[in-house]
Amino acid sequence: MIEERLAKSGLRVRGCLHPSFDDGAPAGIATLMLIGHLGGEFWPAFQSGRRDEADPLDNWTRRVIGPLAQDADALALYPFDGPPWLPFQRWAMKAEGLSPSPIGPLIHPQFGPWHGYRAALGFADRLPIPDPPRPVDICAACLDKPCLSACPANVFASGRYDVSACMGFLKGAAGAACLQGGCQARAGCKQGRRHAYSKEQAAFHTQAFLAFY
């Protein structure tokens, strides 16, 4: 029932886990079901259902997930509710066996950096779930790391992501290409390039990121 309803919105169940004490799940939650997208599959549904409002993607997500959570007797959880922020990346690494990339996003073996998590359903019962995939560090085998050199602002030069430098670049004239076409570092990743977001979707995410800061 959950997967069928999600399919109409272009979202899908990404993985499940039984959170341990140090996983940061809300009290009383025994099973987490992660919900997200792969590639740009949710974009058409979002575009047809979006409204003229602040945070249109977050609010669209609530309209999709809220009723579903209520019908499934689950707690709706979102990565954009905070602070404090829920550790969705930690949950995803346990549920899907993904590893972080040098630029931050988790790397999917098929979709590379072109995926995301929009919500999770928290269940009080310990539901049966499949065993998670074995962790695979895809980026460890990538020797030249083109994602790091693709950034025109060189925000990874120190070995860490310099958020202030990125924000300053995006706000200047030189950042127009990133605002209009999406993050160049993410686009530099070799993995899953055929699943890359459309220019419109990539620009939306970059502009939303800038507005957040």
Image (spheres, grey):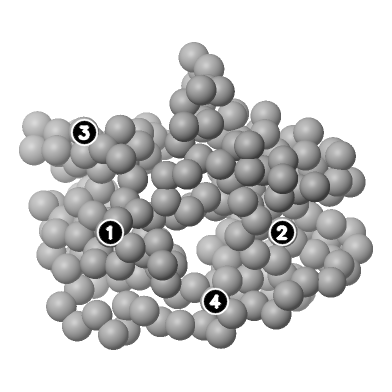
Residue 193: mark: 1
Please identify the quarter of the rendering in which residue 23 is found. bottom right
Q: Nearer the viewer, residue 149 or 156?
A: 149
In this rendering, would 12 be left or right of 99? right
In the picture of the structure, the residue carrying the numbered disc 4 is: 97
Residue 33: mark: 2
In the picture of the structure, the residue carrying the numbered disc 3 is: 180
Which class describes the residues within 10 Å of circle 2: few (<14), some (14-19), or many (20+)? many
Q: Earlier in the sequence, mark 3 or mark 2?
A: 2
> What residue is rendered at 79% in x and 42% in y?
69
Which class describes the residues within 10 Å of circle 3: few (<14), some (14-19), or many (20+)? some
Do residues under tags 1 and 4 come within 8 Å of each other at their CB atoms?
no
Q: Amino acid at mark 2?
A: Met
Mark yes or no: residue 133 visible: yes
Which class describes the residues within 10 Å of circle 4: few (<14), some (14-19), or many (20+)? many
Observer-side mark, 3 or 1, equals 1
**Location of residue 170 in the rendering, given as x and y in whole percent from the top left corner:** 20, 39
